[in-house]
Amino acid sequence: MADSDLRGLRDYFQHFADVHVAVASPLYAALARKVASNDELLEFASRATRGQPPANLLLASVQYLLRMGPDDEPLRAYYPTLGGSRAAHDGDPAALFEAYIQANRKAILPLLSTKITNTNEVGRCGVLAAGFKLAANEAGASLHMIEIGPSVGLNLSWDRFHYRHGTVEMGVSDSPVRIAPELKGPMPPHLDGAMPMVASRRGIELNLSPVDEEETLRWQLALVFPEHVDRAARLSAAFAVAREMQPQIIEGDAVKLIAEVIASLPQDGAVCVYHSQTTYQMPQDKRTALSESLKEAGRKRPIWRVGFEWLDGARTIESSDHALGLARYQNGQRSYQHLAFCDPHGRWIEWGPTPPEDNDRL
């Protein structure tokens, strides 16, 4: 491994520890700092699936094996999602982590080098649903939902969940999936408790994972941060809903297929394309092509696009750089409205801050 590549990977793991998980997962922050300080661990992490985030893949691969392994493994005691109760500052979990990797390299490598971080964070539906509500109000019609990058399709079942936005509730009252993001700033008036109606739903996904397979659930659980027990429980509940619904997911490249899918929809109902933590991973040319395809399709009928994505340089008092936006395509033109800044997992929504410039990720 070249020295420059090693330095770059070290900086990446240090940034992951200091910025991405410093608050969200103290355990992962400690483990990522251990990797950043160890050339052998960095070299091993460099074998992650090309184009995927090495930190997330390495940490998820270890959690996956811990879940499958014996209960008395010492490192497992630091993972609340696996029943552990030790805090990250109690003892030296980083040393246990290094030892576990050394002892299980042959089992970790196939996961690290082939898996992808196709997360299904159901909590993001609390953010997306607010965008869907606004789109449905404007359209005055039920929505034909098209999700770009749905992974196993859990968020395609968003209307089967229960939501609480402040004092406003909507959705299925007895749903096993309960989502209640904290609201920051004034709540928008369009959140009135009436649930948008869904006319149809389908997703377009490059890497299909069967929702009915237990292996799919095990890997999705491994992608959850160890301290986020509530997220893991909600994920399992959402799998049960999706397995019952069996939403349609088309395999392929959304940029190439989106126009065809829109053209196949009935004329009654409004088209709502949406995505979360997806388009920021696309190269610029693909993002541009996607927007151009939607502009062209918008010549025939209006299209609403709800995006919940990571943005460059968009900061709030909470240091969030994730935003919810609503774009509209009609008569070959695109307009954009910033709605909120958000926690990347949907834990809170900050309504009403100064909006960022229009961004093609949304």
Image (tube, rainbow, N blue to C red):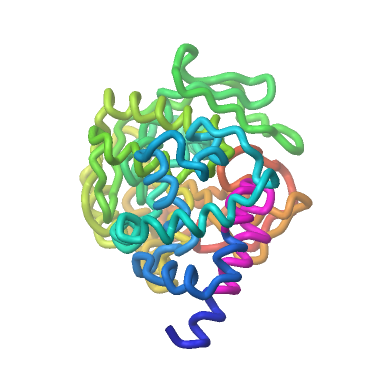
Could you say which is closer to the camera, residue 178 or residue 195?
A: 178
Residue sitting farthest toward the right: 317
Magenta stretch contains residue 323: no
Whether 39 is drawn above or below 350: the answer is below
Magenta: main secondary structure: helix
- The residue positioned 63% from the left and 51% from the top of the image is 92
Whether 18 is drawn above or below 344: the answer is below
The spot of residue 148 in percent (x, y) is: 36, 50
Could you say which is closer to the camera, residue 146 or residue 97?
A: 97
Magenta stretch contains residue 12: yes
Q: Quarter of the image holding residue 213?
A: top left
- The residue positioned 38% from the left and 66% from the top of the image is 48
The spot of residue 21 in percent (x, y) is: 62, 53
- The residue positioned 50% from the left and 50% from the top of the image is 307
Could you say which is closer to the camera, residue 209 or residue 77?
A: 77
Whether 295 is drawn above or below 142: the answer is below
The spot of residue 80 in percent (x, y) is: 55, 34
- The residue positioned 55% from the left and 27% from the top of the image is 179
User: Does residue 316 appear left or right of residue 37 in this picture?
Assistant: right
User: Does residue 255 appear left or right of residue 73 in this picture?
Assistant: left
From where the camera sits, is residue 337 visible? no
User: Does residue 124 appear left or right of residue 264 in this picture?
Assistant: right
How many marks overall? Answer: 0
The spot of residue 137 in percent (x, y) is: 52, 32
**For the N terminus, which image quadrant?**
bottom left
Q: Quarter of the image holding residue 43?
A: bottom left
Q: Which residues are magenta?
A: 10-31
